[in-house]
Image (cartoon, grey):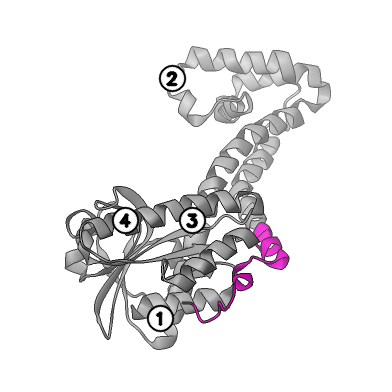
Amino acid sequence: MNRFITSASDLVTTHEQTRAGFLAIALEKNMVGDPYVKQALAFKTMVAHTTGPDDFLNMREIRPFMLTAAGLSEKSLQHLNEEDCIMVIKELIDKFLKPAGEAYIDETIYRFLLTKGDAVGGTMRNRIGAMGQEKLVRCLLSCMSIRGLNYWWADKEQTRFSWCEKPTNDTDIEKKIKAMHWENEKGKRCLGFNMTISTVKKNVDICLYDASKEMFNMGKIAKYNPEKAIMLGELKGGIDPAGADEHWKTANTALERIRTSYSSVGHTVQTSFVGAAIERAMANEIFEQLANGTMTNAANLTDNDQLVDYCNWIIEL
């Protein structure tokens, strides 16, 4: 068990940790949305010379912006021809921009940003989960660096899976890592994220294997050598307390499925849980599972001491 967890209350996310989590998400949302704000400012400069919204029809260079302002997504544009696009822009001008009077440019910008707001929301739903994994990976890298431990890593941005040596400068590398390899006193270790395990027939967030880089085989070890798994864990990076209980129920079901599936084929595997939003009731359940040995380890993602101890545990397994 994590040495910084001595009671269920140690697992509970504090108000300060929740606030810090929401602030981090807000900052990330601003970063994701900033390019759209810059586009809006560029548009305003490009159309500053116009005398009315009808002028927009003859400016092909701003057509993509106008179509977005009309409420069309990039995906929907694949199904429209030029005649359709012109019709949509005309309707935008007649129904919304002309009634805005002299504020037609600002009205166009507001509608562009309204449409892009949906895109930011979709991106952020994915980013929140990714931010949790990135925080975990960065902590792992920090612990490895302190130990002077060398590692190899696989870049999820590369179309072909390949192992890369530890870089001299690892700034933002946590955003790219999809698998890691190192050696400890017990042997060679591979850590993969978001892998579909054949024994479980489900996706698992954190997957540690007793394997060399070659045996990991681009992640195919999860299908062909699932018995090599040492530890499988669930990671929930959402910070909203309102969704904490539901996230734990989902994770707990997944962890029980892992244990049952491996037990049915005669293999044992350790399990763990890392979560950002942990409320009192679920903290009691998690601590009880840790105490009776149902689950091997856990950590609150917002608690640095617990996270460091968890990462060192993974490195040494």
**Closer to the camera in the image, 264 or 196:** 264
Q: At 17% from the left edge and 65% from the top edge, which residue is drawn?
A: 215
How much space separates mark 1 and mark 3, taking CA atoms?
21 Å
**Closer to the camera in the image, 270 or 154:** 270
| Crowding near the residue tagged with mark 3, few <14, some 14–19, many ≥20 C-alpha atoms within 10 Å | some
How much space separates mark 4 and mark 1, taking CA atoms?
32 Å
Looking at the rendered image, the disc whose residue lies closer to the viewer, 3 or 2, is 3
Say which residue label 2 marks: 79
* Sequence-wise first label, 2 or 4: 2
* Sequence-wise first label, 4 or 1: 1
In the image, residue 268 sits, relative to residue 314, either above or below, namely: above
Residue 168, image quadrant: bottom left
Say which residue label 3 marks: 130
Which quadrant of the rendered structure holds the C terminus? bottom left
Image location (x, y in percent) of residue 183: 27, 80
Which residue type carries mark 1?
Answer: Met
* Sequence-wise first label, 1 or 3: 3
